[in-house]
Amino acid sequence: MAPIRSRSRVLLAAAGGLAVAAAAGVLSTAAAHAAAGCGVDYTVSSSWPGGFTAAVTVTNLGDQINGWRLSWSFGAGQSVTQLWNGSVAQSGAQVTVTNAPYNGAIATGGAVSFGFNGTWNGSNPKPGSFTLNGVVCTGSVGQSPPDTPTPGSPTPGSPTPSSPTPGSPTPTGGSPTPTPSSPPPPSTGPTPPPVSSVGGSGPYPAGYETVSNLANHTLYRPASFPARQLPIFLWGNGGCSNNGTDSLPFLREIASQGFLVIANGRPGGGSGSETSALLTQSMDWAAAENNRQGSWYYGRIDTTKIAVAGWSCGGLEAYEVSNDPRITTTMIFSSGLLDDNNDYQLKRLTKPIAYIMGGPSDIAYANGMDDWGKLPAGLPAFMGNLPVGHGGTYTQTNGGEFGRVAVLYLKWRLLGDRTAGQNFVGVNCGLCSNTQWTVQQKNLTL
C-alpha cells in the first residue's frame, strides 16, 4: 500500500440556490380543491451555545405534489444560516423552504426531508405550525383552500399564511396520525438489478455496482434490500486511489450488514486520483436518489445516518468533509494530518470520531496519535490500535479484524445498537481486554 502523500486541500462548495419561475394561467376549480393534507416532523438533532442543527421530514397525505413550499414561523428569534435539500428564504420570523430540483415530487403517502443549521439566543422552541403549499399540516386530509396554488405549482416569494385560514383542514376523529419520521417504506422502490461479486458474512449478502449518475464511484449494497432503510458509509481509498474495489472484502462486509457503502472511484480504477469532492458527491447523490421516484433506492436510504471514513490518503479526505452537517460520525483508518497548519480540521469536529490504526509500525501512527491529542475537549472519540501495520486487514476475508470492528462501530453509531457499543465504551469494553487491540477512549457513553 502506498504511503500517505502530501496534497493540496480541496475546497468544497455547496450549491444551495434554486431558480423557480412563477406559473402563469388560471387555476381550475377542480385542481384548487384537490385533496390535501400533510404531517411534519421537526427535530433538533444537535445544539450548542448559539447554534443548532434541525432535521425536517414532510409527509404528503393528499394527492401527489409536483412541487412544494413549506412555511413556518420561529417563535424566539431563530434564524436559518445554511440549508440542504432545498432553498430557503427568511423574512423576520417567517421561513419558507422550497424544493430542490431533484425532490419536488412527493407521492401520496410519500415524504421528503431536508435539514438546516440555525442560530438561537435564549431559547429554541419548535415552531407551532407548518403549512405545505398553503395547507396547514394537521396530520389529516382535507381540501386545498380555493385561494392557494395547486400542489405542484408553488410560487416562491408569495405570502404564505402562518396560521390556519378559513377552510383549512382540521383533525377528524379516528383519522390515523402518520409517522413522518422516515421516507416511503423500502417496498415502494422497483426491484434492483443484480450486483457483482456477492458475499460477506452479514444477513444481507452484498455486492457492488456502478450507476450512470454517479459514474466515478463504486456502490456496495445488499443484493436484496432489507425491510429497514440503509445507513450510509462513505469511503476514501488509500493512496488517493481511484479504484473503488481496492478494499472489496472490507467494504462488501460492511454492506452485508445492511449498509449502503459508496466508495470513491470506479471498479478497477480510472485515470487520475480521487479527491474529497467525491465524498460530497456521494452524499448529494444519496439524498437525490432517496427522493427520486423510479430509482431502486427510492425511500430505501437513511440519509440522516452517514459515516464518512477513509484509509491513509482517504482518511485525510474524510477529515476535509467531516464538518458537513449531514455527517453522523467520522472514522479515520491509518491516517493523520500531515501539517499542523491543517489542525483547524480537528478544531471544527463536533460529531463522534473513531481511529482504527495499525500500531507503532503503521507509518501513519505518529500523525494519528498527534491528532488524537489535539481533539476538541468533550468530543466523543475512540482510538484502537492493532499491530498489523499500515496495510491493515482490508483484503482479508470479510475485511479481517478491521472489518469486524468497523461493523460493530457502525452498528452502534448508525443503528443505535448498544450491545455493539459495549465493545468501545468503558474499562471493560469488548476490545479492551483479551484482545490484540490497544484502546484509548474520550467522552464515550452508551
Image: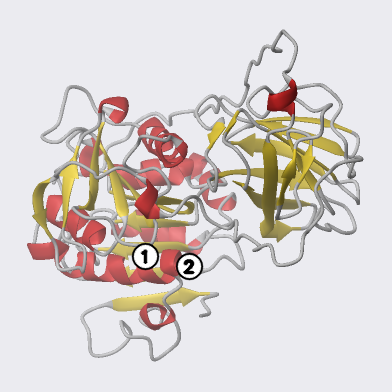
Sequence-wise, the earlier of marks 2 and 1 is 2
Q: Amino acid at mark 1?
A: Leu
How far is mark 2 from mark 1, CA to CA?
Answer: 14 Å
Which residue corresponds to mark 1? Answer: 410
Which percent across, then down, holds residue 278? 36, 33
What is the number of callouts on the image? 2
Neighbours of disc 1 within 10 Å: few (<14), some (14-19), many (20+): many
Residue at coordinates 27% horizontally, 70% vertically from top-left? 405
Assign a secondary structure to mark 2. Answer: strand
Q: Amino acid at mark 2?
A: Ala
Q: Is residue 199 visible in the rendered structure shown here? A: yes
Assign a secondary structure to mark 1. Answer: helix
Which percent across, then down, holds residue 191? 25, 45
156 vs 420: above or below: above
Q: Tell me the tag on residue 72.
A: none
Q: Is residue 336 visible in the rendered structure shown here? A: no
37 vs 157: above or below: below
Residue at coordinates 45% horizontally, 76% vertically from top-left? 441
- 390 with respect to 383 (left or right): left
Which percent across, then down, holds residue 26? 75, 12
297 vs 23: above or below: below
Neighbours of disc 2 within 10 Å: few (<14), some (14-19), many (20+): many
- 394 with respect to 372 (left or right): left
The quadrant in which residue 62 appears is top right
Which percent across, then down, holds residue 327? 50, 50
Which residue corresponds to mark 2? Answer: 381
